[in-house]
Amino acid sequence: MLPDTRDVILNIIMLNYLSKKSFELLITFFGITLVSFFLINLTPGKPTDALSELNPKMTPEARAILEKHWGLDKPIHIRYGIWLKNVSRLDFGNSLSSDMRPAWDKIREKLPITILINSIAIFFIFLIAVPIGIHSAVKANSLSDKLTTLAVFVGFAMPTFWLALILQFIFGVWLNVLPVSGIKSLNYESLSLLQKFFDSTRHLCLPIFITVFGSLAGISRYMRSTMQEALSQEYIVTARAKGLSESKVVYKHALRNAVLPVITIVGLSIPGLISGSVIFETIFAIPGVGQLLYQAAMSRDYNVIMAEVVMVSVLTLLGNLLADIGYALADPRIRVR
Amino acid sequence: MFWKRFKKNKLALTGAILVFGLLVIAILAPFVSPYDPNIINMDDVLQAPGSRHILGTDDLGRDILSRMIYGTRISLSVGFVAIAIATIIGIILGSLAGYYGKLIDSLIMRLVDIMLSVPTFFLLLTIIAIVGPSIWIVMFVIGLTGWMSIARLVRAEFLTLKEREFVLAARSIGASDARIIFKHILPNAMSPVYVSFILGVAGAILMESGLSFLGFGVQPPTPSWGNILTAGREYMEVAWWLIFFPGLAILLTCLSYYILGEGIRQALDPKLKI
């Protein structure tokens, strides 16, 4: 076969695979919106309760007008249809809080800081968790593996908000070396570019550390099991039998196969990371989407909540799609499955 | 065989003893706690840990050790009930998907995929915010959003078990589907579920403490480890013991559940993947 014909065929297979994946993701997306919309809207209590409950001037007629204004008088499946149509135009409705701004605008301005913190965190999670996993798998059942395993369990069992509070206390109050809240100092505007960078770094240190810590255990554990599986394959025996050095066997033959499944975990770990953001953004007073969700939940701001759910789901599904593409590019067997 | 292998694992044995000890403390709370957990004593406000109050007192002069002992009851009940709900849902959906296959299987597995991509913590917060936080709601929603991994495990077991001869034998003597599922296959599919249950209890305790921390968990004056810690946050700079000990209790409890779960996993089947 001519080389370029082969490329064309490979491209077609790849496109076929991607369109199938994208279609699956689209269905999952509708499922997510359906489940979330119905769960939230069928829970007893209405968005207008927050406005009407404590208001002595509220009459039944006024309440009906209010409900009609927010479209709550229609049956739920019709409301879902209307909502979905608006969402396709990126219109999530207005926030029910006092500022009444479009929900999407509120999220858009808070998204960058959350994404920044979580992206840096993901980078460090892989940088640290992958070597830990490899080490535990290669030295399985040795003393150092047992100690790492125990450390991993401590990581699993750690209430991260507690760790955040303790670190905030130690570094912020007791040693007084790191700022305890916010993302910039009061004099931020007057600083030079380099000083601005250092100022932000100092503020983001603890939040990033907490996020990394929260995911380290899971990812390193997963890396350990995929690496162990790779090391038990026959091609490893072959590689050893033909006299390759142990480091070549581990890092060239086993690692390449073991690290791929770990990369696909990124997509699935996004909901967990953003849930973590709710907690640490509240503790460290960081104006991101996590803090916004907390405020929205407190004030039963349905439109903002649904917009957040959609935003996180889209991020998760995009993460999954990217992982799938990377996986298919690296491993030809996946494409034809 | 199981017990022989389990006994050799010192770490897991420690975990089992700690888990058992906590259960005893929870059950005997009124007898082992030195003070009434809700008695307010304004003469003993914010006392540091000492001989009279081993773990100190809070801003209302309540004894922290006693509150934490009663908190053990709440935290463990939330953990157990929530995971029991998740396990029941997971077993039912997993069995149906694995046994019937085809359309039922793809529908249920699609639902699992959806639930895994939904930011469940967001939904938890929202539903609790709407209904109002209570211990029952917290148990219920944690259970409702945590069944996916158990459903997957049970389904995987069913897929291999349903092809075995004893199922064919049961079917050939005319056993109903329900009988085959619950009497013949399910008892053989339970080992990964036990492990997952133990690990899930720890997960649910952590989840409750996280929710309590945000003010959406078990509400004061009922003491849970999460809300003792949260209430202590205001006094963090003058009374470190208010946040230190409850957090430590959560950490050690979950740690013992995790090492117990891991020990059971290794003793049941070293190759079992969870």
Image (cartoon, coloured by chain):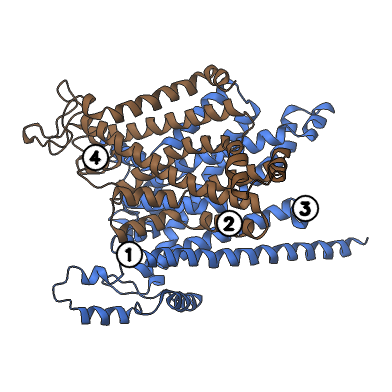
Assess whether mark 3 and mark 1 are in contact (beta carbons under 8 angstroms): no
Q: Secondary structure at mark 2?
A: helix
Residues flagged by tags 2 and 3 on a common chain: no
Q: Nearer the viewer, residue B1 or A81?
A: B1
Residue B223: numbered disc: 4
Q: Identify by letter the chain in blue.
A: A
Q: Please, what secondary structure does the residue beneath circle 1 have?
A: loop
> Does any portion of residue B205 appear in the rendered image?
no
Q: Nearer the viewer, residue A267 or A301?
A: A301
The chain displayed brown equals B
SS class, disc 3: helix
Q: Amino acid at mark 1?
A: Pro
* Neighbours of disc 1 within 10 Å: few (<14), some (14-19), many (20+): few
Q: Tag 2: Cα neighbours inside 10 Å, few (<14), some, or many (≥20)?
A: many
Residue pictured at 21% horizontal, 30% vertical: B66
Q: Residue furthest left?
A: B43
Chain of the residue where label 2 is placed in the rendered structure: B
Query: How far is mark 1 from mark 4, CA to CA?
Result: 27 Å
- Disc 1 versus disc 4: nearer the observer: 1
* C-alpha span from label 4 to label 3: 56 Å
- Please tell me the numbered disc located at residue B108: 2
* Mark toward the viewer: 4 or 3: 4
Q: CA separation, marks 2 and 4?
A: 38 Å
Rendering quarter of residue B181: top right
Q: Amino acid at mark 2?
A: Ile
Q: Tell me the residue that label 3 is attached to.
A: A332
Are the residues under badges 2 and 1 in a single subunit?
no
Q: Which residue is mark 1?
A: A44
